[in-house]
Image: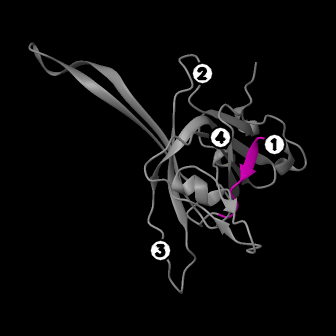
Amino acid sequence: MAGNNSSEIRIAGTGRILVGKVGAAAPTQFSADPSADWDSDVWRDLGYTSTDGVTFSKKDKLDPVETWQAVSPARFVYSDRDLTLKFAMLQFNEDTLPFFMGGDTVSQVTGDTAGVFSYNVPDGPQYDERALGLEFNDGSDIIYRFVIPRGQVTASDDIKLARKAAATLGVTFTALSSGETQPLATFVMKDPSYATTA
C-alpha cells in the first residue's frame, strides 16, 4: 500500500538461524508450530545468538563506463554482488563450532574417556558450503523467512574468553550462486502487507 502505514513497519522481535544442506528451500508452510515447518532432516537450529541479531547486507558494485566526450559516466556495468548475513552464536556444540571454524566434524574420543570429544581445526581453508535459513517474528501473526540455498562462512570474528561475558562465535555468511536461472536467496513472508488488490 502506498503512503504512510505504520502497520507495515517491521521489528524483528525474535528469530532464529538454521543451517541446512546445500540447495534446501525455504519452507512455505506456516503451521501453529513454526519450528516444525523446518524439516529436521535438512535443517539444524543454531540456537541462541547475541542481542545484536542479524546484520543483513547487500552490496552491488557498478563500474562506470567513461568516455572521452563527457565528464560523467555514459553508463554503468554491474560487476559484483555481495549478499551476506552477519551474526554471533552463543552456544558451543557439534553444529556451531564446525560451522564457525570452517568444516569437519566433532568426534567422540575413544577408549576410557566417556563424554570427551575432539575437534581438529583444519590446517587451511576448506570448502564448507551450506544453506542458511533465517526466520523472524514481528508479533504472533507476522513471520519472515529468508533462505540462502548455497553459501559459506567467509569471515569469523575473534573469540573473546572473559569472566564477565559469554564467549561468542561471530561469523559472516556469504551467498554463492546456484546457477544462472536460480535465485541467490529467497524471502517467504506470512504478512498481509503484500496482498494486492485486483
How far is mark 4 from mark 2, CA to CA?
15 Å
Above or below, 40 relative to 25: below
Q: Which residue is mark 4?
A: 146
Residue 110 location in percent, x, y? 72, 65
Given the image, on which type of amino acid does mark 1 rest? Asp
Judge whether 184 appears above or below 39 on screen: above
Q: Mark 2 or 1 closer to N-term? A: 1
- Comes first in the chain, label 3 or label 4: 4
In this rendering, the label closer to the viewer, 3 or 4 = 3
First to last magenta residue range: 39-48
Q: Are marks 2 and 1 in contact (CB under 8 Å)?
A: no
Instruction: Give how far apart the Cα atoms at labels 1 and 3 are.
Output: 33 Å
Labels in figure, total: 4
- Looking at the image, tell me whether mark 1 or mark 4 is earlier in sequence order: 1
Quadrant containing the N terminus in the rendered view? top right
Residue projecting furthest to the front = 111
The x and y percentages for residue 184 are: 56, 29
Q: Where residue 160 is drawn, which disc sits there?
A: 3
Please report contact status of discs 2 and 3: CB closer than 8 Å, yes or no: no
Q: Earlier in the sequence, mark 1 or mark 3?
A: 1
Which one is in front in this view, the residue at disc 2 or the one at disc 3?
3
Residue at far top of view: 69
Helix, strand or loop at disc 2? loop
Q: Which residue is mark 1?
A: 41
